[in-house]
């Protein structure tokens, strides 16, 4: 708890990201059934290294750094590293993470609505009795 307010900001950012991913995953599951579950787990395991949970972004190849900076958790983990190592709260990283979260949440909501409409059109909602 020594991180104080910064910990709450990091936590809120990661929660928003997980909500956006959860909305997208729910749409996939409604449209494709439980067969899409394997795809979702694969997606999450591919996402972990790109969000730089275990190492800083600077160790990635230059072209992959651009990809890593498109994910909101990357900003959180880089901000956490700055806080722990340099004792500096990087508000700029948190603002960028929130901006990306808003965009991610909007895209996920749009995709969810489209997948839900598709599931209704193909009768997938009636058939999922598991």
Image (cartoon, grey):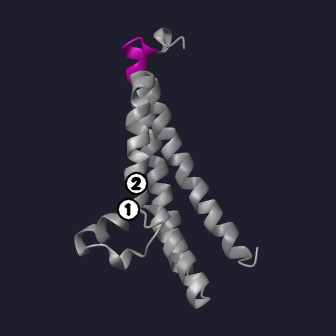
Please report contact status of discs 2 and 1: CB closer than 8 Å, yes or no: yes
Image: 21 above or below 116: below
Residue shown at 57%/59% (left/top)? 14
Residue 89 appears in the picture as rendered: no
Disc 2 target residue = 47
Spot occupied by residue 76 in the image (x, y as percentages of width and height): 53, 69
- Whether residue 68 sits left or right of residue 108 in the image: it is left
Residue 120 appears in the picture as rendered: yes
Spot occupied by residue 51 in the image (x, y as percentages of width and height): 43, 63
Q: Quadrant of residue 47?
A: bottom left
Residue shown at 51%/39% (left/top)? 23
Q: Give residue 50's mark.
A: 1
**Looking at the image, which is closer to me, 84 or 74?**
84
Q: Quadrant of the N terminus?
A: bottom right
For the record, the magenta segment spans 118-124
What kind of secondary structure does the magenta stretch mostly adopt?
A: helix
Q: Quadrant of residue 29?
A: top left
Residue 119 is covered by the magenta coloring: yes
């Amino acid at each position: 708890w020594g991180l104080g307010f910064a910990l709450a900001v990091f936590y809120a950012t990661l929660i928003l990201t997980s909500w956006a991913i959860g909305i997208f995953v729910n749409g996939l599951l409604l449209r494709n059934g439980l067969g899409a579950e394997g795809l979702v787990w694969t997606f999450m395991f591919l996402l972990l290294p790109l969000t730089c949970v275990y190492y800083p972004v600077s160790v990635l190849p230059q072209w992959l750094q651009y990809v890593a900076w498109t994910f909101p958790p990357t900003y959180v983990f880089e901000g956490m590293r700055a806080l722990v190592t340099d004792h500096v709260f990087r508000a700029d990283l948190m603002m960028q993470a929130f901006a990306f979260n808003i965009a991610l949440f909007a895209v996920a909501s749009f995709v969810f609505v489209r997948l839900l409409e598709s599931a209704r059109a193909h009768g997938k909602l009636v058939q999922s009795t598991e």
